[in-house]
Amino acid sequence: MACAPREVQAPEPVALPVAAAPSTIADAEKLDTRSLDRETQRDFNGALDDAKQALTIRERLLPPDDVAIGRSLLRIARVYWMMGNYPELDNASSRALTALEAKLGPDAVDVARALFLRGSVILHERRYRDASPLFDRALAIFEKANGVDVDLFETICNTAVVAHGNSEYQRAITIYQRSLDFGQKRFGAESWRLGWPYGGIGEAYRMMGDYTRARTNLECAVALHEQAPYVRYLSVSLNNLANLHYTVFRDYEKAEQLYRRAIEISESIYGTDDINTGQEYMNLASMLMAKGDFDNGEPLYKKGLDIFERKLGADHKDYVFQVNHLTQLRMRKP
């Protein structure tokens, strides 16, 4: 297993001038190009501004059903996905899917990309069964297309996430292994992208009780995601490795260090009122209470639980699980 990271340097920002008052279709195309370049440079706010300007131009100059408007919406949705801004992604991906499917039909690659982004919103809400058919449709399209390696890889990974969310851990491992084999061939054995399947495999092994394999894969995921251009991947890997140190090895000091780093990243990306951040609050809180620190742990757990109730609903299985877990933790309170 090759997962020793190589140090990578962020690219130097490149000035890409655009006319002072962009107003033509050619200007919109230049803005699209600059948006992609800024995304590569990790300037997501700049990428989003350019993509929105391009959409404004096209909406003013083109018929409302023109495919270029749908593709502009898709570009905006992709940036929102990169930023982890799921409320805005929800609207943009829905509009993109409606526009592109109406113009291109159900089997176009851009439709598959919109399906992936719609599925990602639903997956973020932990509605696994609702997300599954969207990823299945996208996967079927990407498997027949050329030049979509990243799209295919990401869609396979999210299909595995759905299986894991449905507690089908062995199936999740099988799907993640497919994405890992594909990614190694297409991106290289040391690509940061492989942190996703390594982390998913490790978390599935943790749930199945194979802690040696879990640790190997989770540590590899963290090492690879340390060099990823998007830190949200790193926050997931840190949190999963922290879970292992807390629940299996009882190394509370190491677990707390990893949890707090993951929370810092998630708060910076998603904010303090998001499902991902709420989960990490409860994970850290659970560990604090397990070692007897109820004064700090219980309020933090309630904070995460409140997020789950508002975002998922009181009937969601993940909310019910967390309520029951808090009850069990309170039984240990002196």
Image (cartoon, grey):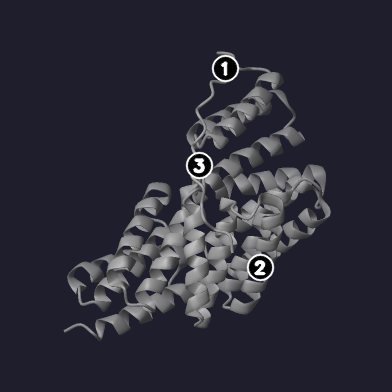
| Alpha carbons under labels 3 and 1: distance apart | 27 Å
Q: Kindly indicate the quadrant of the structure image that contains residue 2.
A: bottom right
Give me the C-alpha separation between circle 2 and circle 3: 26 Å
User: x, y percentage for residue 131?
Assistant: 63, 64
Q: Residue furthest top?
A: 20
Residue positioned 56% across, 41% down in the render? 79
Q: Nearer the viewer, mark 2 or mark 3?
A: 3
Q: In the image, 131: left or right of 248?
A: right
> Considering the numbered disc 3 on the image, is that residue within a helix, a strand or a loop?
loop
Q: Position of residue 71 (x, y in %)?
A: 70, 38
Q: Is residue 185 left or right of residue 196?
A: right
Say which residue appears at 54% left-offset and 58% top-offset: 3
Proximity of marks 2 and 1: CB atoms separated by less than 8 Å: no
- Image quarter in which the N terminus is found: bottom right
From the viewer's perspective, tell me whether residue 109 is left or right of residue 286.
right
- How would you rate the neighbour count of disc 2 (Cα within 10 Å): few for under 14, some for 14-19, many for 20 or more? some
Residue to which mark 2 is pinned: 177
Quadrant of the drawing holding the C terminus: bottom left
Nearer to me, 16 or 30 = 16
Asked whether the residues under the numbered discs 3 and 1 touch, taking CB atoms below 8 Å apart as contact, a structural biologist would say: no
How many labels sit on residues? 3
Percent of width and height locating residue 190: 59, 53
Q: Residue at x 52, y 56 (%)?
A: 4
Q: Residues within 10 Å of mark 1 (few under 14, many from 20)?
A: few
**Mark toward the viewer: 2 or 1:** 2
Judging by the rendered image, the residue that carries numbered circle 3 is 8
Q: Say which residue label 1 marks.
A: 17
The kind of secondary structure element at disc 2 is: helix
Type of residue at label 1?
Pro
